[in-house]
Amino acid sequence: MTRRRSVVIVGGGFGGTAMARQLAGRLPPEVDLTLISEDSYTTFNPLLPEAVGALAFPEQDLGRVFPYRHHLP
């Protein structure tokens, strides 16, 4: 009888999602991969430094929301 193993990643920020994507293609099929996060999405804010420096304003589109189910296997 094969014993199933699990890898659990806590936190879905850039580090957590990058690690999950890397491991998803490398783990054998008998290993379960689980990502635990408070949210079901990650936010990409490419203009965050500009917003802090008052070069961009809140009414501008400063980021994108990416649900985990769209970019994790």
Image (cartoon, helix red, strand yellow):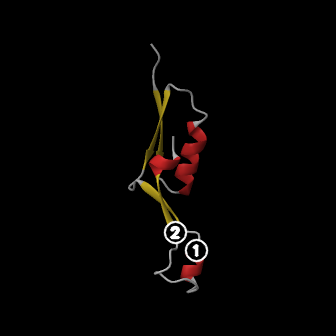
The residue indicated by pointer 1 is 47
Q: Quick one: SS at disc 2?
A: loop
The residue indicated by pointer 2 is 63
Image: 34 above or below 48: above
| Mark carried by residue 38 | none
Of mark 2 and mark 1, the one earlier in the sequence is: 1
When asked about the image quadrant of residue 54, the answer is bottom right
Q: Is residue 10 visible?
A: no
CB-based contact (under 8 Å), mark 2 and mark 1: yes
Q: Residues within 10 Å of mark 2 (few under 14, many from 20)?
A: few
Q: Residue at x 46, y 81 (%)?
A: 59
Q: Residue at x 58, y 39 (%)?
A: 23
**The N terminus lies in quadrant:** top left
Q: Residue at x 45, y 24 (%)?
A: 4
Image: 73 above or below 3: below
Question: Horizontal and vertical percent for residue 7?
Answer: 49, 37
